Image (tube, rainbow, N blue to C red):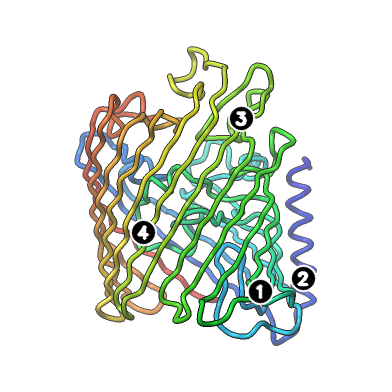
Amino acid sequence: MNQHLTRLVISFLLLGSAFSMCQASAWPTVQSRIQFGAIANDSPSENVFPSGFLNFDEGINLNRAELIVEKSPKSNIKPRIGPFPGPAPAESDWGFEVDLRYGEDAAITFGLDDELSINEDKERLFLMPQWFLNGYLPLADGFSWIAGSWFTSLGYEIGAPVDPPTSFYTHSYAFVYQPVKHVGVMGALKLPVADEHGLWSLGLGLVQGWNNLQDNNDDKTVLFDLRWRSADFRTWLDIENIIGYEQSEDGLTEQTRPFNAVSREGEKLLRRMHSVLLSHRFERIHRVALNLVYGFQEGGDLVADSNNPPGFLITRDSRWYGANLNWYLQWREDRQIGLRMEWFKDADGAHALLPAGIYRSLTANLSWWAKDGLRIRPELRYDHYSGSGAPFGGRVPTAFFGEETHQWVVSLDVTWSYRL
């Protein structure tokens, strides 16, 4: 058994021990979620990237069939999420979560999922995207922590591709450019602020870079955030950041995708990304969310050889930034309209699969909860690109083999969630 599978087995044993120590009043919950969808574009090409994100081809996709085992600690604050109203619990508590997944939404963790032989040459993969311990300590107004593998806190959409499922089937460019998950530790402290000034928290984490169990350099990556909730809990502000040296070493670009930069002299190359999210619920049925993002990758001095597409290695300082506005109206308990508008610029072609330029998109959908746990969602999306490339249609990677500067995408997805 190799080193990584050994770690996986040890993790399961630890969580199994945690299971056995639970009191009857605090047994874990077990739930399942299945999502599949159909997606198509308006060009002769079957390629729907980047609108479809992890779904590259037209047709029917099994996005996920997953099992989630979770025990949540009693707490008034959660890492990656923020503070909640109410008094701080007086006693410490702990919990854990394990997610098992099979499907095509398969953003792998380097050093774990990619090394499972069962996934070789497969489109649908077996993954364990989240496996962590978490807990609460009665410090200040409340302190919580998380340790293991978990979905990133950065950005409006989080997860692989998202968890819990967001209001849109396709994803923003901000999501395409951000990390998916991390392996490491993170803590969050609820600040002792008077109630009339809202709820405040600070978060700090140390992780193995972007989507890595193993890191190809000795430098860790830092996550930190500031979160505020209004006293009535209707307005949220999240300022989230990630910064660290993410250069590729020894040819291991899998660890740093989709941003690959190498220094011949072994110099450290900085990558950072920042996200600001402001959301407000006007009334029970009406809410909006505005997300602003900025990213930076320091360039290396090594140029990719002829076996790689141009732009595969970043050789100059590169930036990406944008904004997306999300609007929702749930006029009935089982009906919701969603609208997303986005403007995004990759100033220097930092993404390994997309050309430099300006991306604009408009997405609209209708969510219908046919019954408890069952959601049916038709969606229509339009993308337009301005720049020297052609990111839509053609073959993958579209940055170098695309044929179109605009794309219509229509999709229909079904998600079924239930507790066992």
Please name the amino acid that badge 4 sits on: Leu
- Can you tell which mark lies on residue 71? 1
For disc 3, the marked residue is: 269
Q: Quadrant of residue 385?
A: top left
Residue at point 62%, 21% (across, down): 263
Q: Is residue 131 above or below residue 393?
A: below
Q: CA distance from mark 4 to mark 2?
A: 39 Å
The mark that comes first in sequence, 2 or 3, is: 2
Q: Closer to the N terminus: mark 4 or mark 3?
A: 3
Quote the CA–CA distance across marks 2 and 3.
40 Å
Residue 393 visible in the current orientation: yes
Q: If you read the primary sequence from the N terminus, does the residue marked by circle 4 or circle 2 appear first? A: 2
Give x and y (percent) for residue 264.
Answer: 64, 16
| Dot 2: element | helix
Q: Residue at x 29, y 64 (%)?
A: 327
The picture places residue 248, in percent across and down from the top left corner, at 62, 28
Provide the residue designation for mark 2. 18
In primary-sequence order, the first of circles 3 and 1 is: 1
Label 3: few (<14), some or many (≥20) within 10 Å? some
| Position of residue 286 in the picture relative to residue 158 (left or right) | left
Question: The C terminus is located in which quarter?
Answer: bottom right
Mark 2 in CB contact with mark 1 (< 8 angstroms) = yes
The mark found on residue 290 in the picture is 4
Pick whichever, 187 or 111, lies toward us.
187
Q: Position of residue 108 (x, y in %)?
A: 57, 44
Element under disc 1? strand
Q: Which mark is residue 10?
A: none
Q: Earlier in the sequence, mark 2 or mark 1?
A: 2
Return the x and y of residue 366 as percentages of the image width and height.
25, 66
Q: Amino acid at mark 2?
A: Ala
Q: Is residue 221 above or below residue 33?
A: above
Earlier sequence position, callout 4 versus callout 1: 1
